[in-house]
Amino acid sequence: MSGKRIKIDAADLVPGMYVAQLDRPWLETPFLFQGFEISEESEIDQLRHYCQHVYVDLKRSSMSADEIQGRQRKADDPVLVAFEQRKPGPAAKPPGLVRRIASKFARIDPTGTISRRLSGLQDYRNKSSTRKEAPKAVSTYNNAVAIMNDVLTTVRDGRSVDVETVRSAVTPMIDSVLRNPDAMSWFVTLQKQDDYSYHHSIATSVWAVVLGRHLGFDRRSLDKLAIGGMLLDIGKTRLPQEILQKPDRLSPHEADLICQHVDFSLDMVKSSHGISRDILDMIQSHHERHDGSGYPQGLSGADIPVYGRIAGIVDCYDAMVTTRPYQSARSSYDAVRELNKHSGTLFQKELVEQFVQALGMFPTGSLVELNTGEVGIVVEQNRVRRLRPKVMLLLDQSKQPIKKNRTLDLRKLPSDSKKPNAVWIAHGHEAGAFGIDPQDYFM
């Protein structure tokens, strides 16, 4: 439970204070987790660089509440501030032994679990296996397809967006992702051969929730991400189908028309009951880019709302892994590499890193080829070592079907090429390569 929070000037921060809130969104700073106890001077330096003031949780701080409140009172009194600067301050009470040990382990914990526990963020755990969750994910996805098909038919007829209907599609999806994100990620990866419009909206919604879950967003925030993801491109229903389906390069006029879908989407949803400011921000800014090269406003960096930054990444990722009239689908691995290539330019570096952590370099359901020449499908992620998932082998070195499929846990095998029997993933393949339908191996 969090306790009383008080405002502290960044200049008055000391070790032992638990920083629960900043004067700006967390994702505008290098701090990946929302909330932490200050234990090192370098953390204070970073806080002072990015913030004028922060909010300190008295209950979570190992420093006493009286000491923290005393520093707050001194900060409000210019005479005491001047006096405080002339004399050395009292030594801060060191963090408790358990917290000091946990903080040390948090720095070397690649899963982020310990940091989440210390920060007070949601720390979601899988509640079912991928295989057990897969049938539920399929049913949930198909239900969402049916609902979104009706929603798009409705808006094409000129009627408004019913947010509650959209929510009825995303609620079961969020539940599935919370139980096990790999199952829904796997099935979404498969659905790339049919109507792009509603499959893309559902996929974008799923990827946004997967990332939000990884970041520790609460259920209310996940709901916003899911609904926003569903409605990002709903304005395209007002565009001519011949432009949307054009296999050749668009003319400047046609490209301008495509850009108008953002305004169309906003116009269609802003009057709908149940649409929050965050959802509108997500729709309006999902084509803005970190370096200012996006549209419609040319926003950059921290000026892009957090929900818009998330939407930009997941929308771009899904577009890359989907077959479209003017481009073939990339493998999930190649799409992730492309995101990494644009990390820090088109997209915020910290968010790209977290998305890759959430998805894995080879998302569940990805078709991959090992250094041995064998081909398999990723059936389960390794949360600690993202390049070493579990792979079910389907084809031998000659690309012939294996009579009896077996699963390799790459985490347990050597990856150093100098060691005998070393195995690693050489590269990914696009969905459907070699005539393989991953659904046959999960259901």
Image (cartoon, rainbow, N blue to C red):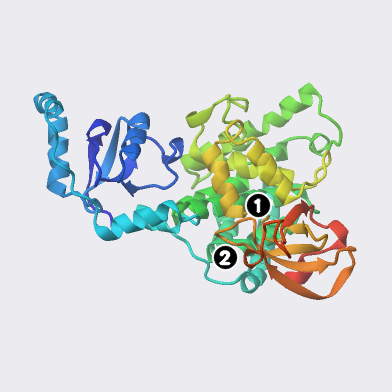
Image-based side of 373 in relation to 73, left or right:
right
Label for residue 361?
1
- Where is residue 265 drawn, in percent x and y? 62, 37
- Where is residue 38 drawn, in percent x and y? 30, 45
Classed neighbour count for the residue bearing mark 2: other residues with Cα under 10 Å, few (<14), some (14–19), many (≥20): many
Look at the picture and state if 130 lies above or below 427.
below
Could you tell me the amino acid type at mark 1? Met
- The residue at the point 73 percent across, 56 percent down is 425
In the image, 117 versus 109, the foreground residue is 109
- The residue at the point 87 percent across, 59 percent down is 434
Residue 120 seen in render: no
Residue 417 seen in render: yes
For residue 123, what is the image quadrant?
Answer: bottom left
Q: Tell me the quadrant of the picture where the C terminus can be found.
A: bottom right
Look at the picture and state if 124 lies above or below 88.
below
- Where is residue 290 drawn, in percent x and y? 56, 30
For residue 22, what is the image quadrant?
Answer: top left
Look at the picture and state if 229 lies above or below 113.
above
Could you tell me the amino acid type at mark 2? Asn
- The residue at the point 70 percent across, 61 percent down is 419
Image-based side of 84 in relation to 231, left or right:
left
In the image, 375 versus 21, the foreground residue is 375
Where disc 2 sits, the SS reads loop
Image-based side of 409 in relation to 348, left or right:
right
**Residue furthest top as drawn:** 252
Kindly identify which residue carries mark 2: 180
- The residue at the point 79 percent across, 52 percent down is 430
Label for residue 405?
none
Marked residue nearer the N-terminal end (2 or 1): 2
Measured in 3D between alpha carbons, the distance from the residue under mark 2 to the one under mark 1, in whole angstroms, is: 17 Å
